[in-house]
């Protein structure tokens, strides 16, 4: 009888081990996205107001395709207060225009993005500012790896 229980326990342990190793999650390959060919430019928004917009490309350097890549930009050298003649950003959540969503990028592929309203400036006179803010960084906020 003891031998019978011993075989049953051994069989259960082996079955559990097979189940655990069969269900082991394989680690997804690391996805590497990079920003290339980015540029920023000034656009007149109203007689005394100007806005920085941007565009560029996202390259998928990883082995897997990706989808729903959300891109935006942050002006790290801009203030949060509206001061005439100084670049500023809004401290509220980004609007739809301030983000772009790339629906799909194949492994090794590139796709373009465009964003508006990265930074703002109001001048006393209707003349464009002589420079764009210094420290603007494109940010990939999120993406999904496409299962193979």
Image: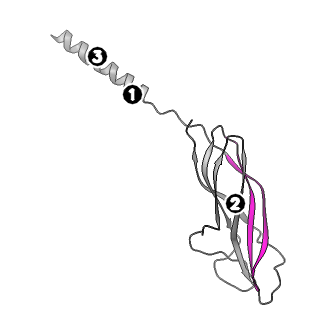
Q: Which residue is mark 2?
A: 138
**2 or 1: tag closer to the N-terminus:** 1
Which of label 2 and label 3 is nearer to you?
2
Mark 1 nearby-residue class (10 Å; few <14, some 14–19, many ≥20): few
In the figure, 34 relative to 2: above or below?
below
- In this rendered view, identify the residue nearer to me: 38 or 148: 148
Mark 3 nearby-residue class (10 Å; few <14, some 14–19, many ≥20): few
- In this rendered view, identify the residue nearer to me: 25 or 53: 53
Query: Where is residue 108 shown, x and y percent of the image?
Result: 71, 41
Residue sitting at x 77%, y 86%: 47
Locate residue 136: give its quadrant: bottom right
Mark 2 nearby-residue class (10 Å; few <14, some 14–19, many ≥20): many
Q: Which residue is mark 3?
A: 10
Q: Label 2 to label 1, Cα distance in Å?
A: 42 Å
Residue sitting at x 43%, y 26%: 22
Q: Is residue 58 magenta?
A: yes
Q: Label 2 to label 3, Cα distance in Å?
A: 57 Å
Magenta segment, which residues? 33-62
Residue extending farthest left: 1
- The quarter of the rendered structure image containing the C terminus is top right
Q: What SS does tag 1 mark?
A: helix
Query: Where is residue 142 shown, x and y percent of the image?
Result: 58, 54
In the figure, 139 relative to 85: above or below?
above
- Residue 20 is tagged as 1
Q: How many marks?
A: 3
Is 113 left, or right, of 26 in this rendering?
Answer: right
**3 or 1: tag closer to the N-terminus:** 3
């Amino acid at each position: 009888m003891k031998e019978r229980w011993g075989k049953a326990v051994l069989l259960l342990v082996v079955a559990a081990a097979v189940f655990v190793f069969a269900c082991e999650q394989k680690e997804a390959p690391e996805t590497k996205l990079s920003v290339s060919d980015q540029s920023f430019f000034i656009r007149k928004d109203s007689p005394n107001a100007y806005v920085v917009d941007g565009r560029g490309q996202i390259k998928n350097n990883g082995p897997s395709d990706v989808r729903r890549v959300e891109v935006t930009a942050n002006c790290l050298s801009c203030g949060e207060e509206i001061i005439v003649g100084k670049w500023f950003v809004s401290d509220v959540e980004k609007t739809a225009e301030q983000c772009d969503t790339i629906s799909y990028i194949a492994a090794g592929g590139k796709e373009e993005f465009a964003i508006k309203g990265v930074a703002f400036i109001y001048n006393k006179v209707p003349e464009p500012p002589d420079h764009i803010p210094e420290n603007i960084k494109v940010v990939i906020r999120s993406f999904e790896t496409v299962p193979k």
